């Protein structure tokens, strides 16, 4: 077992710190979602800059939850890598394939080879 | 047990997989919870990637989430996008915090603290599921209604200022030409589905008599807003294409736009909600065990930690669902 019996230091301070961080990130996300500033509409790598900000903040939140709340930082390197790397690799692969093909289908509809709006 | 196992004499070496050799340094239960979470995370990423596929496929006509989810309890008719889902997100994050506090108290063998924090976690989860149900109810019921076209497209109505206009404000009340067939009236013992509130003829007739109402299509313009047609084109298209009305959303029709949006919304948030419900049930079981002192006797609150992992995972998934359904 990772935790030996005996005295355990309380992590309460860190938990509240992480909660504050998560709240701030969520508030920023919601604020951007309501405000939707014009200058963030520029496209960077096929997507609006605003959407990239949302996705990066989401990944940051996921990191905080996994590392601090799920105690991934205390697990052994082997367990951490076998869970995290597997997930990240397969997710990137899957999203690349599906989003790429979704864009292709859109172009086929758009260029009039096939129509869905008649 | 020993008598049935063939010994190899390598029990304590790497190949023997013996006691001294625990490469992941985690208990069996915790390790398996992690790998279950990994596989579940891949399931959810499959769903979200499929949602992304459909969205990229209809990238210029996808419904705008801010227009779909803009309700807030006790604030009828107020356009409040994001606020409600932000509240739900906070509730779930907070229940995650109380869960990790329960785990922390468990490490220190403080039974009463574990009880309080787990109780708060369960309450938070229940509030979240309730909120989700309310969100579904609004989505299913719809607000303004729309007209369906031959090609399965949606035409919505706006006034000249761009404000949405509901079907109820447009349609003229005609004497009902048709009544709903009930099984008591026919030789075929089945009911007909509910008749639509208005017929398409009533909507078109009402539209003709209201010169300041325009048709809004699903297509997004460069600014990311839905295209509004001119009055002449509105009328022409409505007469040519419209075949019926749509109110609310279900698995086949969706007044907000593409039915795929509704399908994915029901499926992904439904699957997530199912996880929350099962999380609550597992939490309750562990909570009862804490109450009767099972883990006190066992001198380890690791079960609280394991169920905590699952609960945090549910929160983790929601973080992604929130981003991809409401923000992006």
Image (tube, rainbow, N blue to C red):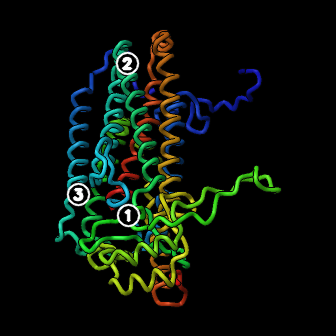
In the rendered structure, the answer to whether residue B88 lies left or right of residue A38 reads: right
Chain holding disc 1: B
Q: CA distance from mark 1 to mark 2?
A: 55 Å
* Residue mark closest to the camera, 3 vs 1: 1
Residue positioned 45% across, 11% down in the render = B296
Residue B58 percent coordinates (x, y): 45, 74
Say which residue label 1 marks: B169
Say which residue label 2 marks: B114
Name the quarter where the C terminus of chain B is drawn. bottom left
In the rendered structure, the answer to whether residue B138 lies left or right of residue A38 reads: right
Say which residue label 3 marks: A34
Residue B211 percent coordinates (x, y): 32, 78
Residue B164 found in image quarter? bottom left
Nearer-N-terminus badge (1/2) = 2
Most extreme residue toward the front, as rendered?
Answer: B175
Q: Which mark is residue B48?
A: none
Of residues A13 and A118, the one drawn nearer to the viewer in this rendering: A118
In the rendered structure, the answer to whether residue B284 lies left or right of residue A58 reads: right
| Label 2 secondary element | helix
Is B137 situated above or below A15?
A: below
| Label 1 secondary element | helix
Residue positioned 33% across, 47% down in the render = B85
Residue A10 percent coordinates (x, y): 27, 22
Of residues B217 and B271, the one drawn nearer to the viewer in this rendering: B217
Query: Is circle 3 on the same chain as circle 2?
Result: no
Chain holding disc 2: B
* Residue mark closest to the camera, 3 vs 2: 3
């Amino acid at each position: 077992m990772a935790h030996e019996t005996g005295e355990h230091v309380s992590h309460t301070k860190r938990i509240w710190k992480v909660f504050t961080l998560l709240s701030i990130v969520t508030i920023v996300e919601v604020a951007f979602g309501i405000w939707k500033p014009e200058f963030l509409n520029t496209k960077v790598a096929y997507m609006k800059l605003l959407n990239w900000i949302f996705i990066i903040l989401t990944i940051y939140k996921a990191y905080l939850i996994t590392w601090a709340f799920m105690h991934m930082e205390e697990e052994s390197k082997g367990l951490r890598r076998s869970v995290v790397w597997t997930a990240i690799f397969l997710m990137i692969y899957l999203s690349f394939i599906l989003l790429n093909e979704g864009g292709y289908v859109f172009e086929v509809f758009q260029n009039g080879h096939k129509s869905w709006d008649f | 047990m020993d008598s049935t196992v063939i010994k190899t004499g390598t029990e304590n070496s790497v190949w023997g997989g013996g006691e001294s050799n625990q490469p992941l340094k985690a208990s069996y239960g915790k390790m398996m919870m992690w790998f279950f979470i990994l596989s579940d995370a891949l399931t959810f990423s499959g769903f979200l990637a499929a949602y992304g596929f459909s969205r990229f496929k209809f990238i210029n006509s996808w419904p705008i989430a801010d227009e779909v989810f803009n309700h807030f309890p006790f604030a009828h008719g107020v356009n409040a996008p994001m606020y409600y889902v932000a509240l739900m997100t906070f509730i779930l994050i907070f229940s995650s915090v109380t869960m990790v506090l329960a785990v922390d108290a468990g490490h220190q063998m403080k039974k009463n603290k574990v009880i309080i924090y787990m109780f708060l976690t369960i309450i938070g989860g229940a509030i979240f599921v309730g909120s989700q149900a309310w969100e579904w109810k609004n989505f299913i019921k719809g607000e303004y209604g729309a007209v369906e076209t031959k090609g399965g497209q949606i035409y919505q109505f706006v006034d000249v200022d761009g404000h949405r206009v509901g079907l109820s404000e447009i349609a003229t009340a005609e004497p009902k030409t048709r009544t709903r067939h009930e099984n008591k009236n026919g030789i075929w013992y089945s009911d007909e589905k509910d008749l639509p509130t208005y017929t398409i003829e009533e909507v078109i007739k009402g539209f003709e008599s209201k010169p300041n109402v325009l048709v809004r299509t699903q297509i997004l313009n460069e600014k990311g807003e839905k295209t509004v047609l001119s009055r002449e084109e509105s009328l022409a298209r409505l007469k040519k294409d419209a075949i019926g009305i749509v109110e609310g959303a279900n698995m086949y029709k969706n007044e907000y736009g593409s039915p795929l949006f509704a399908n994915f919304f029901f499926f992904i948030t439904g699957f997530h909600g199912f996880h929350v419900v099962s999380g609550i049930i597992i939490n309750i079981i562990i909570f009862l065990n804490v109450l009767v002192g099972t883990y006190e006797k066992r001198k380890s609150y690791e079960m609280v930690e394991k169920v905590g992992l699952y609960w945090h995972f549910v929160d983790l998934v929601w973080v992604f669902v929130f981003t991809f359904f409401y923000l992006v």
